[in-house]
Amino acid sequence: MNFFFSGIQIPRSTQNPLGSTVTPANVDQITGLNILGISLARIDCTKWPKSSPHSPSRHGNPFSPGSWSYSLPTELGHTGAVAIAGLSSQNPGVITIANAVFGANPPINPDVLAKAFQVDDKLVSYLQKQFWYDNN
């Protein structure tokens, strides 16, 4: 059963802060994908998902393998949606910008972030204290 994964067809709960859930089907779930450089992901979204800006990591971009991209949240309309993404990596990942910047451990110096984003130090400190939800 190296190429079998039971679960990609099952809708997942979107009752979380982001309004979306990702179900991976990569080398961790399907051992036969090892060294093939491919995987899938199911994305369940509510009608108004709150996906954070993010960048696919480890060459997980479904449109241009090996290149860097940046995805912003989009509005889907009046109903939820399901997407199936084919990815050019056996073990793709996502770097959520807010998590990487404001949720870094150890934290990035607030003065540096305040200058980079041209905001007040107090706002940076506030953002660094937030809980950053990860839907992977």
Image (spheres, rainbow, N blue to C red):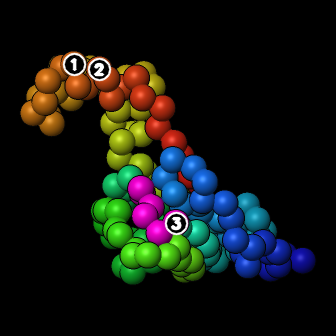
- Check the image and report above or below for 102 versus 52: above
- Inspect the image, locate mark 1, and give the three-letter code of the amino acid beneath it: Lys
Q: Quadrant of the C terminus?
A: bottom right
Mark 3–mark 1 Cα distance, whole angstroms, equals 32 Å
Query: Residue 117: x, y in percent?
Result: 15, 36
Q: Quadrant of the N terminus?
A: bottom right
- The span picked out in magenta is 46-51
Q: Secondary structure at mark 3?
A: loop
Query: Residue 126: x, y in percent?
Result: 31, 23
Residue labelled with disc 2? 125
Mark 2–mark 1 Cα distance, whole angstroms, equals 5 Å
Residue labelled with disc 1? 122
| Of 63 and 135, the residue lying toward us | 135
- Inspect the image, locate mark 3, and give the three-letter code of the amino acid beneath it: Thr
Looking at marks 3 and 2 on the same chain, the residue that comes earlier in the sequence is marked by 3
Q: Are marks 2 and 1 in contact (CB under 8 Å)?
A: yes
- Inspect the image, locate mark 2, and give the three-letter code of the amino acid beneath it: Ser
Q: Secondary structure at mark 1?
A: helix
Q: Name the magenta segment's main secondary structure.
A: loop
Structural crowding at the residue carrying mark 2, measured as other residues with C-alpha within 10 Å and reported as few (<14), some (14–19) or many (≥20): some
For the point 61% across and 72% down, the residue is 42
